[in-house]
Image (cartoon, grey):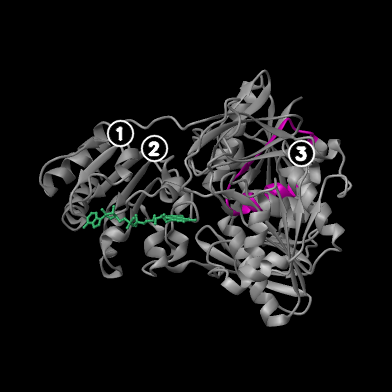
Amino acid sequence: MKIIVCVKQVPDTETRIRINPEGNGIVDQDVNWVVSPYDEFAIEEALRIKEAKGGEVVLVSLGPDRAQTALRNGLAMGADSAVHLKDAAFDAADTMGVAKALAAAIKGIGGADLVLTGQQGVGGDHSQVPGLLAGLLDLPQVTMAIKIELGEGKATVTREIEGASEVWETALPAVISAQKGLNEPRYASLKGIMAAKKKAIDVKDAAALGLAAADLAPLTTVASLELPPARPAVRMIDGDPETQARELLRLLHEEAKVI
Amino acid sequence: MKSIVTFAEQRDGKLRRPSLEAVSEARRVADAMGGAQVEAVVIGAGSGALAAELGHYGADVVHVFDAAELAHYATEVWARALGQVIGEVKPAAVLIPFTAMGKDLAPRVAAATGAGLVSDCSALAVKDGKLEARRAVYSGKAFATVRWSGEPQMATLRANVFSLATPDTSRAAKTVARTVDAASRAKVTAVNAAAGGKLELTEAQTIVSGGRGMKGPEHFHLVEDLAAAFGAAVGASRAIVDAGWVDHHIQVGQTGKTVSPNLYIACGISGAIQHLAGMSSSRIIVAINKDGDAPIFKVANYGILGDAFEVMPKLTEAAKAYFAAKG
Ligand SMILES: Cc1cc2nc3c(=O)[nH]c(=O)nc-3n(C[C@H](O)[C@H](O)[C@H](O)COP(=O)(O)OP(=O)(O)OC[C@H]3O[C@@H](n4cnc5c(N)ncnc54)[C@H](O)[C@@H]3O)c2cc1C
């Protein structure tokens, strides 16, 4: 069983966001970069499948030099090898460009029995790459998986939807994206961290992936980035609990007009 | 003639509210583009019956894929159907609700049609005949304005943010019956409703959420009682989901649901950035917390500094009386 896991390095959610002078992105410095939490679920699931059925886990990440830290984290958890897609040409790529590069990399390493991703990359929060990848690779997809059971050439996947869960059966290979609830990711052991240092990271640029500038031309661009509008200052409601309750209802009705 | 295609999600023979919001928004965008046509797409066994309602909300044409073998959502089939319409109509824009289905479907359609896709938009504007989207990034710590370089301009829309048009029952849409190959490598084999048939968080107009301040699962009924009094859905912070008091599907926040109700009442929730990520776009936020320095008060419109165990039962009582009097 060969499993490819797509990994994105993202700002830690606690990081204070500063907007760059161009006003269209964030300042990269002083940001604490981590593996996107949903991708950790994907890595963990791949490792559990490997432990149960044997096989190999390959990580793929697109990003600047620092993305190697994310790959090392995944290798330390137990993945076997990693591919780092790095090229200045990727800087302006949008979700489609990223998906094209990942798809090319996946094809380049001979495909997989299963491609796992997080259901969204924290920060951008697009939830696009799994579906784009599946579409570009012409593979079936199941997104937002909270349970995966592998059978012969197929997988049974439980997926979360509004007010219900769906059970899907998909042929393999397939792209499956991980939702919270799928598993509890392990921490890398000291031994794992040491072993990860010796594992290979294969670096590929756009040319090695057979991608030309036109393939990466963005279809969507961030024109500007702003801090959210400030919310009005809180209005504290005084009095004993009974008074507070009645006053709140009055305000919700008369002032906020939400009840 | 310019057109806007919109995907109308239906489940169990009913149009979901986010679909009606998307059609309403498509109508507004079409009008702002100087009278473009709104072409809705509805897919599923029995979906033909929904065409009239889509007309009431602003669709000019409804493309209906109604066949017995379309009983369950299947990504590949739905993408093929929507792709078929997009290929023929060549719309300026495609609007899809950002629901579990829309989230799954839109990228697949984008990959097939080469459309640029902007996810989870919370506002759309038309500038010089082109769309411009606004969306939250970095857990709501920033907002991006995004533009497309070509057409179709495909966008998924956050639920509960775009207002519903007032349905006009005298408006009739033209229906176009269509067929699609129903072969799919991934299939739904069962749908299990979540326990209790509870109100869906992402579509609720009012949400009452509880956090670690509720002290233990045995007190969580205070949250449920208050929610019942308001006719609200119940939410939770991750702290109490991780502690096993409540199920993950009601978690609000970065690794849970993103919600935008009219009214969000946070009880015993500190307001960590990851929680705010999921609810800070709520219209009115109420916080009940015994710590005046809790960050939740920074985003709240109304705050009650006090013990949730004293305030919540009083609020439940008062709300019951208020809604009973209102009728
Ligand atoms: C990667 C990542 C993702 C995360 N995703 C999420 C997410 O999706 N959603 C989420 O919610 N969190 C998420 N978190 C966790 C988040 O950081 C916080 O730990 C969590 O939100 C805290 O939950 P809480 O407010 O219930 O608990 P606490 O922070 O412990 O706050 C409890 C609050 O209750 C108040 N309180 C106590 N007793 C009373 C009383 N008697 N009456 C009134 N008030 C009282 C306290 O003053 C305090 O403010 C995430 C964290 C990480 C690292």
Q: Residues within 10 Å of mark 1 (few under 14, many from 20)?
A: some
User: Which residue position holds label 1?
Assistant: A256
Q: Chain of mark 3?
A: A
Measured as percent of width and height from the top left, residue B145 is found at 59, 30
Q: Magenta stretch containing residue A214, yes or no?
A: no
Q: Amino acid at mark 2?
A: Arg
Q: Nearer the viewer, mark 2 or mark 3?
A: 3
Give the residue at x 25% y 66%.
B219
Measured as percent of width and height from the top left, residue B28 is found at 58, 27
Q: Nearer the viewer, residue A210 or A114?
A: A210
Q: What is the secondary structure assignment of the residue under circle 1? A: loop
Q: Amino acid at mark 1?
A: Ala
Give the residue at x 59% y 49%.
A10
Q: Residues within 10 Å of mark 3 (few under 14, many from 20)?
A: few
User: Which residue position holds label 2?
Assistant: B283
Residue A150 visible at all: yes
Above or below, A139 relative to B326: below
Above or below, B198 relative to B109: below
Q: Is the residue at mark 1 from the same chain as the one at mark 3?
A: yes
Give the residue at x 64% y 75%.
A48
Measured as percent of width and height from the top left, residue A105 is found at 82, 55
Q: Chain of mark 2?
A: B
Q: Amino acid at mark 3?
A: Ala
Q: Nearer the viewer, residue A230 or A252?
A: A230
The residue segment tinted magenta is B89-109
